């Protein structure tokens, strides 16, 4: 289950619904970082290991939600999908929010045994079929939308809300010589490759790599003894707004997710947060991302498995301030004109208004 500080759930969806006049109660797992509550009533439940979470946390969350007497129940986790038929039997209005393409995501998990994969994928399809019993479905991408009936599915993309701080941020060429990655840190998200890039001969002198996000203890221990750690600052997990503030002093953002089925067709939220802060990206050369990054000239696409290619792209920005400034302006313009939360929030509010009248 998601922590209560989750960006999409709390700071986008819940905050937008409160702004539209809805009374919102968020039942979620306690967070390792703090954050603003934005007039959202938050009920925290303890963070438990995976099996206990499924057996104890999920039923507890649904029980607490029922006790609030809510008119609409908005579920965000596959492990809560069992409650959809129960809530519908109790004549409750239910929205299921699909953040990821579940069948593709589960087969990409490194801990999933190859022999178990067919059964895991079958279970994922059962989750989708059960979610279809909801009153309505909200999805984060067009790819996920194809899994659900179009007549009762709304696309609410995970674009960030624009902030005043971003409109008065320093010009990108006046910022610290920092390359930043914000988000969960794992091998699949390019952790080792990013740190290795800092050891390449082409990595610009005087620049620093900053990694901010939750990281498994074993992986952190491995990275901290890597040669690239000398050029890397490990900040750990920081509050969502603090993470966005960090971008205001960065020159380049990294989004070098590795080429797996789960990431190839994804739309990484952090890329859009980089754009909002006027930070051009060095990103994985995926077809879907080309339509954004190349078309709008707001970053450089690379082979995400190559530290040398990543370092070369960073070096291009370091050696060409005009290119850096141009891509920064394009990124910011794209965020203002298209890739921001305002239009997505309106879709969500309209969806709630329709569901409330059922």
Image (cartoon, rainbow, N blue to C red):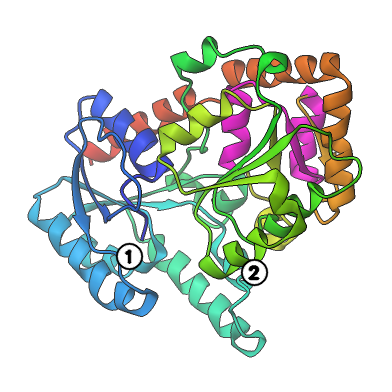
Quadrant containing the N terminus is: bottom left
| Residue drawn at point x = 25 percent, y = 30 percent | 38
Q: Which residues are magenta?
A: 268-297
Is residue 270 part of the magenta span, yes or no? yes
- Dividing the picture into quadrants, the one containing residue 288 is top right
Name the residue carrying label 1. Answer: 80
Q: Quadrant of residue 102?
A: bottom right
Residue 324's spot in the image, x, y percent? 79, 20
- The residue carrying pointer 1 sits among few (fewer than 14), some (14 to 19) or many (20 or more) residues within 10 Å by Cα, namely some
Could you tell me if residue 160 is visible in this image?
Answer: no
First along the sequence among labels 1 and 2: 1
Q: CA distance from mark 1 to mark 2?
A: 21 Å
Say what secondary structure mark 2 lies in.
loop
Nearest the camera: 95 or 239? 239
Could you say where residue 352 lies in the image, as x and y percent from the top left? Answer: 30, 36
Residue drawn at x 71%, y 19% is: 328
Is 33 left or right of 59, judged from the image as shown? right
Mark nearest the camera among 1 and 2 is 2
Q: Position of residue 313 (x, y in %)?
A: 86, 36
- Residue 155 lies left or right of residue 356; in this view the side is right
Residue 350 at x, y percent in the picture:
35, 29
Is residue 171 one of those drawn in magenta? no
Q: Which residue is label 2 attached to? A: 108
């Amino acid at each position: 289950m998601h922590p209560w500080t989750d960006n999409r759930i709390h700071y986008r969806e819940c905050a937008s619904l409160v702004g539209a006049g809805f009374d919102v109660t968020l039942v979620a797992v306690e967070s390792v970082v703090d954050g603003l509550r934005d007039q959202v009533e938050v009920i925290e439940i303890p963070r438990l290991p995976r099996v206990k979470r499924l057996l104890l946390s999920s039923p507890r969350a649904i029980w607490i939600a029922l006790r609030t007497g809510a008119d609409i129940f908005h579920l965000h986790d596959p492990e809560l999908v069992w409650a959809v038929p129960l809530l519908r039997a109790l004549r409750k209005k239910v929205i299921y929010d699909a953040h990821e393409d579940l069948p593709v995501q589960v087969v990409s998990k490194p801990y999933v045994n190859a022999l178990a994969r067919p059964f895991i994928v079958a279970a994922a399809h059962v989750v989708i079929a059960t979610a279809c019993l909801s009153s309505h479905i909200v999805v984060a991408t067009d790819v996920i939308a194809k899994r659900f009936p179009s007549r009762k599915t709304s696309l609410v993309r995970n674009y960030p809300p624009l902030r005043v701080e971003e409109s008065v941020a320093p010009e990108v060429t006046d910022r610290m010589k920092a390359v930043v990655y914000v988000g969960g840190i794992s091998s699949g998200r390019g952790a080792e490759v990013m740190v290795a890039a800092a050891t390449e001969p082409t990595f610009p002198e005087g620049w620093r790599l900053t990694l901010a996000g939750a990281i498994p203890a074993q992986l952190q221990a491995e990275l901290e003894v890597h040669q690239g750690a000398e050029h890397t600052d490990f900040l750990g997990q920081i509050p969502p707004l603090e993470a966005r503030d960090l971008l205001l002093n960065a020159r380049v953002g990294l989004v070098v997710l590795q080429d797996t089925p789960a990431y190839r067709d994804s739309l990484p939220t952090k890329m859009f947060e980089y754009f909002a802060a006027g930070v051009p990206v060095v990103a994985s050369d995926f077809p879907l991302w080309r339509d954004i990054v190349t078309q709008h000239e707001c970053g450089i696409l690379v082979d995400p498995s190559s530290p040398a290619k990543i370092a070369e792209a960073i070096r291009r920005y370091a050696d060409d301030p005009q290119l850096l400034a141009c891509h920064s302006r394009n990124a910011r313009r794209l965020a203002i004109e298209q890739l921001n939360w305002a239009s997505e929030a309106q879709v969500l509010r309209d969806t709630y208004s329709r569901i409330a009248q059922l």
